[in-house]
Every structure is written in structure tokens, then in C-alpha cells.
Image (spheres, rainbow, N blue to C red):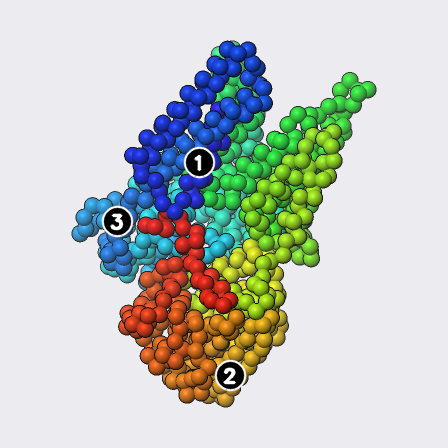
Amino acid sequence: MRAVTIGFAAGAAWLQTQALLPSMPAGVAAAILLAAWMLLWHGWLQRRVRGMGICSAVPIVAALRCATSLLAGAAIGFFWAAWLAHRALAPQLAAADEGRDFTLIGTIDNLPYRFDQGVRFNFAVERVMGAAPGAVPPHISLAWYAGFRNEVTEVGDVQPGERWQLTVRLQRPHGNANPYGFDYEAWLLEQGLRATGYVRPAPHNRRLDSFVFSAGNVIEHTRALLRARILAALPDKPYAGVIVALVVGDQRGIDQSDWNVFNRTGVGHLISISGLHITMVAGLFALAAFNLWRHSFFTRAQLPLLLPAQKVAALVGAAVALLYVLLAGFGVPAQRTLYMLMVVAAALWLNRIASVTQVLCSALGVVVLIDPWAVLWPGFWLSFGAVATILYATVGRTTLRPARDAAAPSRLERLWLALRVGAHTQYAVTFGLVPLTMLLFAQVSVISPLANAVAIPLISLVVTPLALAGSMLPSALAAPVLGLAHLLVEWLAVCLQWFSGMRYAVWSAPTPPFWLFCWAMLGTIWLLAPRGWPARWLGLATWIPLLAAAPEHPAPGRMAVTAFDVGQGTALLIETSEHRLLYDTGPLYAATSNAGNRVILPYLKARGIAALDGVIVTHSDADHSGGALSVLDGVRVDWVLSSLPSQHPIARAARHHLHCAAGQHWDWDGVRFELLHPLAASYADAALKPNARGCTLKITAGGRSMLLAADIEAPQEAALLRRAGATLRADVLLAPHHGSGTSSTLAFLQAVRPHSVVFQVGYRNRYHHPQQAVDDRYQGLLIERWRTDQMGALSLYFDNAVDIASYRQTHARYWYAR
């Protein structure tokens, strides 16, 4: 059964790598036939083996049985996940209805997230006013902004379970598509959210009912009440979001800077309702129930004669774990712990002995059965990987044994042995997860063992119980209890910040290819093998290519360009054999969110790029400079070239800042860089708009060239034609001003004569870039058009020819096709 379960999970994971979904009638029939054939083969093989008098434990026989079970499970898992995917994709917004206003009646379906500009929440649609049934998907994600496009709007105080009438504008699921980036469209699919949008200012936006009863609404309302109590008891406290995360699993209130510290020190798994916390709380309640039942609640009822105390304890522990997991928002680590506890409880009630591998595989099967998209997220692999590593490295090896000459261990001996078990477990997890952590995050926390040695007992044994108790106590008692929990988190944060600031707190390297990850995992299994296994230390040798890898470079004289999908904005990474230049840094999304920390830095980290030779910030508009400060803070940058004034925060944050000016040029590794605009004299003209000073760069490699035209408009294009008309010829053009109607004049395009143009634009952007007339102009000149909103990030390689590939093509997934 364990092999079938593992195959089931593998089949579901394989489905998530497909560009198209299989046809369901044929797929279901194929899955049933394949699974039936495998099971029949399994049964025939078992009977044949018995008839020949061969032990079923013979390696070749055991391997055949395991293989048939794996294949049968994989077939079932693949088509089960496909069936769920077909169901999830069925409700969708028609393309013609994007941007149309709908008046909806429905309920607030989750715990709303409040931010400076408004509130974001999920909405369960009950009725669509004035439209056909099914015109709007049943579950959508909405934002309600306090000010949108210069309109002042009053944001409603939405709470879970309330029924509202809202006028909204919707679009189909869409997210930025970048290598190593977060797949927002896959996340929306997993959450069952088939449209996104925002609330429009309308007189009919109003609350209809204060609460609509359902099990889900009760849970979410309870989570909201607990969060409100915590925030009221800890007003303006810097780590109130951590206390909220420990009680109700809502991590959205934790600052990004704090997450950076938690992740660098390897304690991020503790800043939520983790499996460790659930097990601890369930264990405490189970122990209390066991003792009370055993003593019949200190009466003469003799309850253990009616039902064994062990079964009562198991039932209470499982019930408490279920309630706590529901409060946690039902995340994968919490689900894994819940299902494992329930399997143990069921085995105890049924008087069955369940092995630890059976328990783990049962939890794996249930998680994938309910949510096959869980395999897409790092938490799934880290959660099950950590437990599997602990089981492999400790089961049967860490039993607490007394000294040989002692009848019973002393208290000090028991403490020492417990510390040894804990240290061995931490050693196993730390070393066992190194290859997986490098595959998922391209870094591993070196300081993690020391940081966890401090954080695990403090968070799990002190802070979490205090936070839980404080959230449920009367207000007079809640404030001091929660205040103490917050004080301990503050002290821990100071310690973690010191750890994080160490020079070698984190080891980074490029994301390894899958074969290298498998090789390192084999070495890790060897390293953690039982005592007596020969030369276990040799397992560390398999890590050398994993940890010592260097970022890939183009060949000398060649150039690689990555045009990121950052929405409505510009950001390109230009790479030569020994140098890297970032041209613009993308837009600012929110106060703490920008293209720098959401797109560019994750990409650089995954590639193992720790430094940039230069950054060009073409001008001050937020869609070009919004991510600059994050980039300057996240990686070492030698110099910044821009048209920004010297007192601008970006110029002041740079190690070395210069104004860009026509005539500047340099050569890197056989690649020529030339600044064509603006003129140095233009900085004396205070009347010029920022767009007019956009740093325009031409790059030539291998006889091919690319012209990056920033946001220049028709007057600047005309000036360039007069000043440098003969040098404008380029094979690829970054469309001036994203294809606005004020740029890309016919004369300019005829001078550049590109065979390809790149439009870095946002999906359904409000400027309607590229303008239809401009797009038609490029099409009329037979110029190949590449749009990041439709194709995702673009990869361009310049050699004797120019090769262009889009992320949505090379990384096609079935949820993109819709």
C-alpha cells in the first residue's frame, strides 16, 4: 500500500508538469485499465511465486511487486489530479467580460487582509445581478482600495461570513510569469479562485447580512475574532504579526524584512502553526484527558472499565489537532501532522499496529488526494522531507537506554539522553534537507542549527502556549500574557538579527539541475546511514558540485538578455561572459512590494548571482525605478547610471552614481555598450519631463544589436534621428514608452529597422499599451512582436543570430492555456 501511495503522489506531481490536460473519458478509461492490469499482474505474480515455493522477499520478486504497485498508483494519481484540474478550470470568466462591471451578491469567504491602501478578500458569489447564471465564477478574489485612479473611496469594514452587495470589475486569472518566480496563476487555481478584480465606487455597495451561517464562515469568523483580540492587546507592536501567525496561521502581517531574517537563520518553519506546535498542543490535551479519564474525573464512575484511557486520549488529541489545524488555515504542514495523528488514533482505536512509514504514507496520500496542487509548493516537500529524514535517521537508533550498571536511569541521565536525542534529530534534519533546500531556494542557512537550538524551545514551549492562552483569556488578563509572549519574540528577534548579520550565515549557489540534486540526495542518505555503515563521511563529497557551482555565463563576445515580466514596467538583465548589467528595476507595487524584491532578486538568487557590475535607472517614473532600492539592498552593485537628480534616494543609496549622457561607452568581454541619449546639457533644463531624459542604450554583440529606448517619445526620437540616425540600426528594439501613442514614430522605426520588438507591458494595463495604432505600425513593417503580458519573461541570446524564447512557451502549463 505504501508503494501505491507514493506512486499516487508521483502521478499527481507529473500531471502538474503538463502543458495540456488529458481528455477525461479516455484518460479515466486508460487509468482504470492500467491500474487493473497492474493489480492483476501483482496478484498473478504473488500466486506464481507462492506456487513455485519462492519467498516473496527475494529481491527480484519484491522489486517487481513494488514496481507494479508504483505504476498502478501513478496512473490513478495522474488521472485523479487531471479530473480535479478539469473541474477546477471549468468555471471561468469569459474573455469578453474582462473589464466589465458586475453587481454581485455573496459572502466574505476568508480572513480579509488589510493594508495601507485598502483590504483584500475572497468572495463567494451567490447571485449576479442582470447577468446570466454562471457569468461570474463562484469564487473570486477582490481588492477594495481606499483611493484608486485618483478616486477617493470609502472602504467597507468587511468581515468573514457577512453577505454584501458589491459592484466589481473582474479579469481572468493572470500573474507575472518569470523563471524561479512565484506562480500566482497556479496558486489561484489551487485556491479555487477563477477571477480577480476590485470593488468599484458605487452607491449600492452595502452589507446585506451581518452573518451567514456555515461551517467555513464560523471558522473564519473565529479566526478574525482571535486576530482582532491579539492586535487590540498589542497595538503598534512590531511582532504582533508573529503572534497572530502562531495562533491563527495568518502570516500576512509579518514584515518582509523580518521574513528575510527568519529565512536566513532557518527558523521560518516556526513562525506559523507548524506540525511541532500542533503535536505539542494535541499531546498536552491528550495527556490531560488520559489522566482525568484514568482517575474517572476523581469520581467513583470507573470510566476506564467502559473505555480504555488510551483511546480517550487519542480521540481528544485528534479532535484538538483538528480544531487547531482549522484555525491555521489548513496549510500543508498542518494537514500532514493532522493526518498522521488521525492515522495513529485510528490504529489505536482499531487495535492495529501502524508503522511510522505507514503513518507518513497515509498522510501523504490524503494530502495529495484532497489537494494535488500541494506538490507545487516548497512547504509540501520540506514538510514531508523533514519527517522522512527524521524517521530514516532516528527510528531504532535513538532509544533512551540507561547505563549498563544502573538499575534505572537517574534524572540527570534521562536529561542527558534526551538532549542527545534532540541534538541527533536536529543534526539529521539540518544535513538531510541541504540538497532539497538548495533545489528549492538556492541557499542553505549555515547558522540554522544554532538558531533553531534557541528558537525551537522558546517558540514551541513558551511563546506558542502563551499566545494561545492570551488570545482566549479575558481582556484584562490577555494583555499581559500576550505582552510577555511578544517580549520574548522581540528578544529572540534581536538574537536572530545578530545571527543573520554574520558574514557566512547563508551559503548560496545556483539552483542545481535535477540530476545533481538526486546525486546529492544519494550522498545524504549515505551520510545519515546507521552507525557501522562504511565511510559515511564520503556522503559529504556529493555536496561539492552542489555547493560550489558557479553561475552560468554566455561565451565571450556573446550576450544574454532577460526581459522580466514585471507587469507595467521595465526591467532587463544583460549578461556577458564576465559582467552583468540591470537596465531598469521594474515598478513599485505597494509600500513593501516591488519588482526588485518580488521578481529580480529571487531570479538573481536562484541563478547564484550575488553582485551586479552596474544598474541603469533610466528615469524616475515608478514603473522603471520602483525596485531599485530593493536591488541595491539585496545585492552588491558597483555603480548606478541614471538621469536622477543627485539628491534622489536611489542616487544616495548607490555606492557610485553617475548621470547617463550621450557619448558614454564601454566594452565588456567583446560586447559594446553605447549611451545615445540624453545629452549632458539636458540636465540644465528643469522643464524637461523625466521621460525626455530616459537613458537610451545600444548594445552590440556578435554582430547583432539591441536598442533599449526607455520611455522616450516622438521629440526625442526625432532628435536621435538627427544626431545618430546612422547608428540606430538594431536587430531588437525595446519599444519606446511601452508602445504608447506618443512614441514609435514611423521614421524612427524605419531607421532602427528591427526584426523583433519587445513590449514590456502589464496585462490589461490602464494605458492600453501597446496602443493599437502603434501595434499595427509594427505589424505593417513585418516586425515580430513579443509581449511580456502574453508570453511571460523573454530570454534573448545574441550570437551570429538572435534567439528569442518566452517563459510561457518553454515552461508551458495547463493552467496557462485557459
Q: Which mark is drawn over residue 662? A: 2
Q: Position of residue 450 (x, y in %)?
A: 69, 45
Mark 3, mark 1: which one is toward the viewer?
1
Q: Residue beneath label 3, please?
A: 136
Q: Residue beneath label 1, please?
A: 11
Q: Looking at the picture, which amino acid does disc 1 mark?
A: Gly
Q: Position of residue 397 (x, y in %)?
A: 68, 27
Give the residue at x 82% y 20%: 405
Mark 3, mark 2: which one is toward the viewer?
2
Q: Is residue 323 left or right of residue 670?
A: left
- Relative to residue 479, is residue 638 depicted above or below? below
Real-space Cα separation, disc 2 to disc 1, in angstroms:
57 Å
Q: Is residue 478 left or right of residue 638?
A: left
Q: Is residue 664 left or right of residue 623?
A: right
The answer to whether residue 415 is visible is: no
Q: Nearer the viewer, residue 740 or 730?
A: 730
Q: Looking at the picture, which amino acid does disc 2 mark?
A: Ala
Say which quarter of the image contains residue 731. Answer: bottom left
